[in-house]
Amino acid sequence: MIPIAKPQLDDAEIQAVSDVLRSGIIAEGQRVAEFEQAFAEYTGTEHAVAVNSGTAALHAALLAHGIGKGDEVITSSFSFIATANSILFTGAKPVFADIKADTFNLDPQLIEENITPATKAIMPVHLYGQPADMDLMTDIAEDHDLILIEDACQAHGAEHNGKKVGSFGTGAFSFYPTKNMTTSEGGIITTNNGEVADKARMIRSHGSKQRYLHEMLGYNLRMTDISAAIGLAQLRKLPEYTARRQHNAKLLSEKINDIEGIECPVVREGCEHVFHQYTIRTRDRDSLADHLRDKGIGTGIYYPIPIHKQPYYRELGYNDKLLVTEKASREVLSLPVHPGVTDADIATISSAIRDWSGSKC
């Protein structure tokens, strides 16, 4: 079986965890501080605040910017539900704009149409590891005095015009096991705003800067030293992992881009796509997925139901008509290109897709 995702862990992570366990300091400690510093340096930001999930990173980033009841945040419905739920957690309202058909990211041209007096922030999603159009996003945020929060949970190391995502505004990353790097579970906030960083640190630790002195409402969102130790080992390997993902994606596109009815992923000019997912489009998505499963090839559908069509959001009264998003949800299929995939695996995947295409003629 060629799985759609496979965490890459070896003796480095095992040794890192063992060292923490032997130290006796296993909650938030020196390893977390080291990981925060290393990740801030990697993303080119002044601050990084580690938390216990990508969802927590999004939630704390919004709260640190003062977003709450009565505010609106423009974002994408074509994402994991945590993107919008994190906005609801604050008491604010997610407002969905449609995406671009080729990149699956927010269409900047549609953002301004959704801005109202209640709009407080824009939250673009760098979906599948493809950077959103951050030049236009930044311009829109500045023109309308809006906060820019980047959902970079799938985009570790992705770049737009030589600048890493998570450094344009306030970034939120996930380290779930299937992500491009992992801490088992975990997340991190990146920012160049010292006040936002300080607030995020308080929010993750019961609203306190020092023990038993609580200055604001906070939560228990802390990362452990065990997770941070894994993260440090993974971060050192991330450039190698990214290069392998990009190699696999390029090779797979070369082998299947001439197949009728298949649309391969695009890489926007000036961007570094890190291929958290290699996502094709086809009108016969379910047929192809079944065929590949029968051939021992894992696939994923991210995402079959847009957020605005989820039952809970329907209960909240969402009835958006996002035609590009809805069409994408019926056609997308992700194929394995993670670092564990070999050139031989790519040949197997492409051959299976050709067999499927030939059987339809």
Image (tube, grey):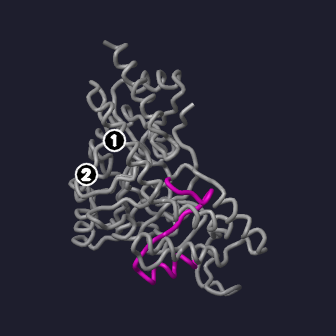
**Farthest residue, direction front:** 344
Quick check: 3 left or right of 111? Answer: right
Q: Which residue is mark 1?
A: 325
Find the magenta span and give its range.
Answer: 180-202
Quick check: 287 left or right of 15? Answer: left
Q: Secondary structure at mark 2?
A: loop
The residue positioned 47% from the left and 21% from the top of the image is: 291
Q: CA distance from mark 2 to mark 1?
A: 19 Å
Q: Which residue is mark 2?
A: 268
Across and down, in percent, residue 121 comes to 35, 66
Across and down, in percent, residue 217 comes to 60, 76
Residue neighbourhood size for the residue with mark 2, other residues' Cα within 10 Å, grouped as few (<14), some (14–19), many (≥20): some
Q: Amino acid at mark 1?
A: Thr
The residue positioned 52% from the left and 65% from the top of the image is: 236
Pick whichever of labels 2 and 1 is earlier in the sequence: 2
Q: Which mark is residue 12?
A: none
The residue positioned 49% from the left and 53% from the top of the image is: 180
Across and down, in percent, residue 259 comes to 29, 26
- Where residue 287 sits, quadrant-wise, is top left
Q: Secondary structure at mark 1?
A: helix
Foreground mark, 2 or 1?
2
